Amino acid sequence: MEPKQAATPEIPGAPAVAPPSPTEPIEPVDPLPAKPDQTTPDTRTATGAPTGADPRAAGQQGPWLTTSTGTRLRDTDHSLKAGERGPTLLQDHHLREKITHFDHERIPERVVHARGAGAHGYFEGYGTAQSVTFAGLFDEGRRTPVFVRFSTVLGSRGSADTVRDTRGFATKFSTDEGVWDLVGNNIPVFFIQDGIKFPDVVHAAKPHPDREIPQAQSAHDTFWDFVSLHTEAQHHTLWNMSDRGIPRSYRMMEGFGVHTFRLTNAAGETSLVKFHWKPRLGVHSLTWEEAQLIGGLDPDFHRRDLADAIESGAHPEWELGIQVFEDTDDQMFQGIDLLDPTKLVPEELAPVQPIGRMVLDRNPTNFFAETEQVAFHVGHLVPGIDVTDDPLVQARLFSYVDTQLTRLGGPNFNQIPINRTHAPVNDMLRDGFHQHAVHAGVAPYRPNSLDGGCPFTAGADLSDEQTRAFVDAARNVAGPKVRAQPASFDDHFSQARLFWESMSPVEQEHIIRAYSFELGKCYEQAIRERQLQALANIDPRLCSEVATALGLPAPEPGVEPAAVTPSPALSQLAGGPWPPDGRVVGIVVDPDGSLADVGEVRSAVLSAGMVPLVIAPHGGKVADLDVQRTFATARSVELDALLVAGSPAAAPDALPTRDAKAGAARSATLDPRVVLLLEEAYRHAKVIGAWGEGVRTLTVAGVPDHAPGIVTGSAGIGVLDEVLALAGMHRSWQRFAPA
Ligand code: HDE
């Protein structure tokens, strides 16, 4: 038979694919059949269910307690002893299995991004990416299952969610053509331009190695020592000091692929792109005081918010978009080096074009099995999507598999259920720790004739989704072998300035306060001074305001501040109003006062897709209303808006107030914990609504009833309508003092 040969892709500069040896079979056949003495184990899941059973149900099989090998047990509360009061016997295999397994329950946490939360969902293509990529997942209406893991970077697994940090935004697309991982962040630029510096930046940002403090934060000497010396980190650091470093919710974050990627279309033409996730709910943040309070009051705030929103049906949604650039030899766009991951491209210069949407609609069943064991890798690519020569992504291509070998205990982590591809696998990878597959045949090598030549390399017809292969986009590469970087990487300040100049006054004020806090936590004067110098190079006013807060002189700029054109799209205040889905509305009630309207308002909040929390002096019920929070468990930071329907008097055990004189007057008529709720909600510029007796509560608590974002009226529903309209802007921004 004449051997057939896969057509070689017609890509200029691509090396010719060596044809198979003429004697190599190429017709697909099954591996050699088993010999008469060979039998394969029955196909069963890890806990004994026949494969095909719902894997979520397969965790527990049958009603009886068993050993891990299915032997039913009579007693698991008493170890086997020599007499009731005697020593435990070594022969107690059940005791040993139970304790040994427990001893090994923990795996190493991720070296970065250890703390995270995950969710399942789907991606749906719009069919608008075809001019730039043939990847099937972008086809119009095609749905691809996804698993997303959001994370903080610096903290340990048990650290607080609301710390000031970058957030990871990693998405695993289980496409028909293999797994594509888009392992991004909520900040579009990175601290370093070359992956070889990753251990440096991470060592500097992690807790000090002598005392292992501080946990999960950048407000310490080693971090600022590094970023002030290594000024390419200044742009990313400025984003961290902005409100982007303290998101309100994972559901309200943008995501960025950071690097430039290369896409190929069906004609074999390539384009350079940057990926953006745009949240349907807009981009919103906490205030710094909220973030700090929540760190203590509810360290799981973001994890809880994500799970609660999904459970309540407020499914988080993002649109995926791309900025598209011509794949020129210099890989520059309007003076911006597309291979420099410390640079972004303003959307005003290259608009983000939507190519699909993602909905997260299912919570994980088991945190460890899914969120902890998921293994992302920037090298998980599918036909039509490729990486570029960005030196940061190049190093990442090595790091992810490497770290997972240790973290997940061997090379077979892609067989763990959460990581399993939905595409057929025939990979010639064999053996290793925790091998779950029972591979048939004798020839896991190529070329072979013993397994009929299988597996075959796939075809080059880019339009045939059933046979096409991933092909590395061919590019000419030439140059001396050097440890160096291009001169275009040397500008460390102009884009930091662009970001600063694009902020609204209130956002700039938050940035000034963030630097003042973080540098105020440094002990070394030299580090503060060096960082002030970097700030002077970004913007003299930013520098002088922070210098004043630190009580230090403001240095002169070392470089001429660049003339930049602001990018309004970088401000979080641009746009709106935003949908209120899943936002939390507290309703303060007085069991002894009028409860008119409260039930109706509560239902209307629910109908608006928001979460009403009835807050009362005690738990249980108030009239026919269930109480979700008492004055002891409620705190304003959990709420997006506050409604006051009554004027609950001070309870005998109420907390003392700060201002003894005013406090005494108030607490005679109003519970001081309600005063605290209102003070904080007011200070954090949240919308507050009150009706009936609630209006008096505002007055007694000292809340100015004509301030922006304060709504009063006689009927609950009328007040609520106005509150909902205002809450669409996230906060009453006018209430923050202008800078
Ligand atoms: Fe990562 N990064 N990274 N990173 N990264 C990891 O992989 C690394 C970088 C990002 O939820 C690790 O499995 C290097 C940029 C996310 O499981 C590790 C460099 C961006 C996650 C690793 C970078 C990211 C990680 C740790 C510089 C945004 C969490 C555990 C060359 C585009 C994924 C793991 C999850 C995790 C290495 C830089 C995003 C050690 C060497 C830039 C979202 O392999």
Image: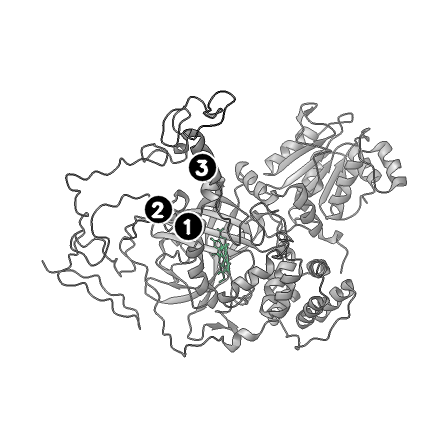
Which label number is shown at residue 685? none
Give coordinates of residue 239: x percent, y percent.
61, 61
Label 1 vs 2, first from the N-terminus: 1
CB of mark 1 within 8 Å of CB of mark 3? no
| SS of the residue under disc 3 | helix
Scheme of image coloration: one colour
The image quadrant where one finds the N terminus is bottom left
Kind of residue at badge 3: His
Q: At 40% from the left edge and 58% from the top edge, which residue is drawn?
A: 379
Q: Residue at x 58, y 38 (%)?
A: 609
Residue hosting label 2: 422
| Residue 165 in view here | yes
Where is residue 711, by image quadrant?
Answer: top right
Which residue is rendered at x = 70% and y = 23% of the image?
A: 623
Q: Which amino acid does label 2 sit on?
A: His
Ligand 1 within 8 Å, label 3 CB = no
Q: Which amino acid does label 1 sit on?
A: Phe
Residue identifier under label 3: 101
